[in-house]
Amino acid sequence: MHCGILGRAAGSVEGFEYSRAMRDADITWTAEALDRFLQSPFAMVPGTTMGFAGLADATERKQLVAWLATLTAASPHCAGLVNDPGNTKEMK
């Protein structure tokens, strides 16, 4: 799910059960959008059912977004997962 998140539309991984709010959100995951969402998911996507209250610390959010940005097709953690929208396997 996290592999290839940057540049992907929110609520778009086929086979994953998103809330209606997330499916209908008009969000493309950029570093800035991820930072805002991680800070306050319920404020950014009212009605989301994601069980995450947010991450207040800006430095921690920046580090998390930087790590997520490394999860590309070239990442060993994402081998076979990126560019396969039907694949909902957990990363190892």
Image (cartoon, helix red, strand yellow):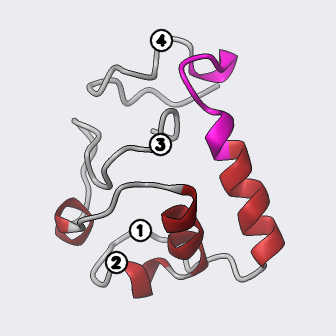
Amino acid at pointer 3: Ile
Q: Nearer the viewer, mark 1 or mark 2?
A: 2
Q: What residue did someone put label 4 on?
A: 80
Residue 75 occupies which quadrant of the picture? top right
Q: Nearer the viewer, mark 1 or mark 4?
A: 4
- The reply to whether dot 1 and dot 3 touch (C-beta < 8 Å) is no
Amino acid at pointer 4: Gly
Residue 69 occupies which quadrant of the picture? top right
Q: What residue did someone put label 3 on?
A: 5
Say the numbered circle drawn on residue 45.
2
Check if residue 18 falls in the magenta segment. no
Residue 42 is situated, as x and y percent measured from the top left of the image, at 42, 83
Secondary structure beneath dot 3 equals loop
The residue stretch that appears in magenta: 68-78
Which residue is located at x 31 percent, y 50 percent?
A: 9
Residue 13 is situated, as x and y percent measured from the top left of the image, at 29, 40
- The reply to whether dot 2 and dot 3 touch (C-beta < 8 Å) is no
Q: Is residue 79 left or right of residue 47?
A: right
Which residue is located at x 34 percent, y 24 percent?
A: 87
Residue 76 is situated, as x and y percent measured from the top left of the image, at 67, 15
Q: Is residue 59 above or below residue 12?
A: below
